[in-house]
Image (tube, coloured by chain):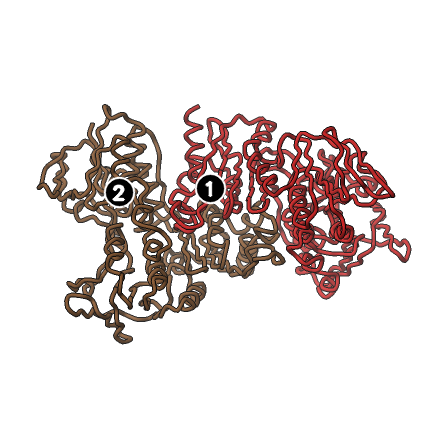
Chain colours: A brown, B red
Amino acid sequence: MRLIVIGGDAAGMSAASQARRRLKPGELEIVAFERGDFTSYSACGIPYWVGGLVDGPDALIARDPATHRENGIEIHTGHEVTGIDLAARTVTVRSANGTRTEDFDQLVYATGASPIRPGWADTPAQGIFGVQTLGDGAALQEWLPGRRTAVVIGAGYIGVEMAEALQRRGLRVTLVERAEQPMSIIDPDMGTLVADAIRGLGIDLRTGVTVEALETAGGRVSAVVTDDGVLPADVVVLGLGVRPDTALADAAGLPLGATGGLATDLRQRVTGPDGIVEGVWAAGDCTQVTHLVSGRPMHLPLGTHANKQGRVAGINIGGGYATFPGVIGTGITKICDLEVARTGLSSREAEAAGFQFVTATVESTNRAGYMPGAVPMTVKVIAERDTGLLLGAQIVGRTEAAKRIDAFAVAVWNRMTVTDMTALDLGYAPPYAPVWDPVLIAARKATEAAEAR
Amino acid sequence: MRLIVIGGDAAGMSAASQARRRLKPGELEIVAFERGDFTSYSACGIPYWVGGLVDGPDALIARDPATHRENGIEIHTGHEVTGIDLAARTVTVRSANGTRTEDFDQLVYATGASPIRPGWADTPAQGIFGVQTLGDGAALQEWLPGRRTAVVIGAGYIGVEMAEALQRRGLRVTLVERAEQPMSIIDPDMGTLVADAIRGLGIDLRTGVTVEALETAGGRVSAVVTDDGVLPADVVVLGLGVRPDTALADAAGLPLGATGGLATDLRQRVTGPDGIVEGVWAAGDCTQVTHLVSGRPMHLPLGTHANKQGRVAGINIGGGYATFPGVIGTGITKICDLEVARTGLSSREAEAAGFQFVTATVESTNRAGYMPGAVPMTVKVIAERDTGLLLGAQIVGRTEAAKRIDAFAVAVWNRMTVTDMTALDLGYAPPYAPVWDPVLIAARKATEAAEAR
């Protein structure tokens, strides 16, 4: 048996590693192709590398090609798969040495995602960067010395993190967002707290602003033209989200899901209108996932999902059994010392999914109010009307805030009601929580809001 | 209608406050008696007050008597209820002004708990302290100036916290524990990490040591006699646990539970072999609770439970509906910068409950390994054999560790299996977690352990 893995990052190499743990080289040959230079790295760490908090790129690499080879995985970097022939069970691979064809019995498709580049971003100029691969990070790092002004376009997780990183590197940073608030993955009232923190860093945050074009000079980007004026820019970072890299899959006739990502079953087998595509697996940012609260498919590229999906694919390829049921949209980030977290559905997402709901927002503290280091924390809960089903939660705080979302995440996962949540036995000690944990206070207030309807 | 509340701390005053929110003074008269001077305080904060981190006692008081009166609750401090006549629906109250009788229609029994005092602790001498009431804290504070040596007896939560506090105050501290490890609420392998931290503070930790007597001189304690030698002590702190204060209930003929605490139904109505005792409620450290994993009654005094139980009693007294289903034994504490947490059952408790189980222990980090501030964290998971049901978890780490127990706590609460847990969508970003959160890594390893059996 021969397994070919397309894509050498988290999803692909997790699949390869798990399959290798279960099957010996004599039972399963594993060959992976990565078009870039790096394997199994943390793209999420790029902002901290750019910001100078982390020495990259090596620190961001969990397993380099040599380690994979030691583990019995044949990995080829600088090799791009350019075609898949499902009938012939072959892939075409291009490298510096030319093009060749390779056979497979099983195929893992793990090509990841690419930054969304609107028409104006196709300007052929230097200084325009996505932040999707370690190669992107390396290119940006090489470009940065001597640059003075940066414009980051899009104020989602990566945009906000990159704006802070570039600011930290000493550049004058403008962060442009089309919506009226940064971080539209959280509710507007919570987003206001984030906007304040971004501006507090000295970043010029411009919301409700649309980018129209890039200006260039001498083959380099020089400014970003917006409906709010022209912003000088030696560096432009695209934080407009990503889309699944599925061109190769599409060309091969693999079915794509409604969101443009590959649809899979619970075991990560590629699935289409005609059922499962035998022997073809997909994992990571190139796939779509099911949101377990809305029940809808969505594209939610995130390293933690990619790792889990890859692991699940690899266990199944190896003859074991594991499933990836879906996601609930948990996300956390840090802006300077502001911690931001969410899980489940935001108000807008709950609305779009068809839920009627109540919300409750509470101000509490990370520790007992009398303890040194006690600082405020805002917690918002979204619960279905009548049933009180917990639909989502958001947290913004200064310290020891973000990971509190996990209690909500496990509660959402288990379809708890906010009333049930009021009885939860969460950790209490004065250095860690008020006697009523902020999670519990929010659940209480949401219970009252649900009752009061 | 007239409600009498016995005990003015968390449980009693939460009940009073919730009843008051739902019923106007014309509908329900509320009278509370507290034998001490303080109401609604955080006894859990006493170690931090003693250690000089918190200005007490005022900071530890959530609501003083004046605030309760403003809220329409008649509260009398310095008033001890000395008898309950269930047939006549009266209580006898003693104060500096003498003894009187008061009528009630509804009664909330919330007398709390008292430190366990073995025979040797009954020595009539100054310098011996429990740490159960704010009055205890005040007495200790008054005693401390000029003292040089302290012996803390019992290395559970309160003993360890008090040992650190006294050390911080500059005393030479010995911590004596009869068991072979401190913190026997966690497994011995995890307890070793705690022992190291305690010794690292310069505290003389002596495990496997039994106290035999106290020596006194001039009416003051002077030493603790153990089977390991005589330990000089200007101060002795009792950290041997507490027992429910139920003497008054017992004398009145109220039924006691198997653990010595008052047994209640889900709504906190006192319950005995003959059913519910009409109009009599109990909440807080004087009650027993149900452990939802073992299914057994237990005495688990903790402020967070007392507050919840009081709230539930008050809502029901006020004509609403709320329940307190039980506990799962979540507990966290801090020793210097070591964070310790547990939930569910320890190995010993799982054994005692009759479970057969596997354990898995993993070493991970609080943040992505490459981030500044990433430090080790040890996570242990206990899961039922065959089913993989999560029975309990323990965490020891240096920072951002303890509150991670909440994810396990919500998982235990919802009776998740460790296999289910591997798919959990927990918060991931490099400043907060490795791409595989320690919780998930532990769940994975426990799943493998369960499979490997």
Q: Quadrant of residue B265?
A: top right
Q: Residue furthest right?
A: B98
Quarter of the image that includes the N terminus of chain B: bottom right
The three-letter amino acid code for the residue at tag 1 is Pro
Q: Say if residue B145 shows up in the picture.
A: yes
Q: Is residue A261 left or right of residue B123?
A: left
Q: CA distance from mark 2 to mark 1?
A: 25 Å
Q: Chain of mark 2?
A: A
Other residues around mark 2 within 10 Å, as few (<14) / some (14–19) / many (≥20): many
Q: Quadrant of residue B76?
A: bottom right
> Where residue A370 sits in the image (x, y, percent)?
63, 58
Nearest-to-viewer mark from 2 and 1: 1
Other residues around mark 1 within 10 Å, as few (<14) / some (14–19) / many (≥20): some
Q: Chain of mark 1?
A: B
Above or below, B228 relative to B134: above
Quarter of the image that includes the C terminus of chain B: top left
Q: Nearer the viewer, residue A339 or B47?
A: B47
Above or below, B166 relative to B275: below
| Disc 1 secondary structure class | strand
Q: Nearer the viewer, residue A162 or A121?
A: A162
Residue holding disc 2:
A39
> Where residue B124 sits in the image (x, y, percent)?
86, 41
Q: Are marks 2 and 1 in contact (CB under 8 Å)?
A: no
Q: Say if residue B316 shows up in the picture.
A: no
Disc assigned to residue B376: 1
> Where residue B272 sits in the image (x, y, percent)?
73, 37
Disc assigned to residue B360: none
Q: Nearer the viewer, residue A266 or B241?
A: B241
> Where residue B285 sits in the image (x, y, percent)?
70, 44
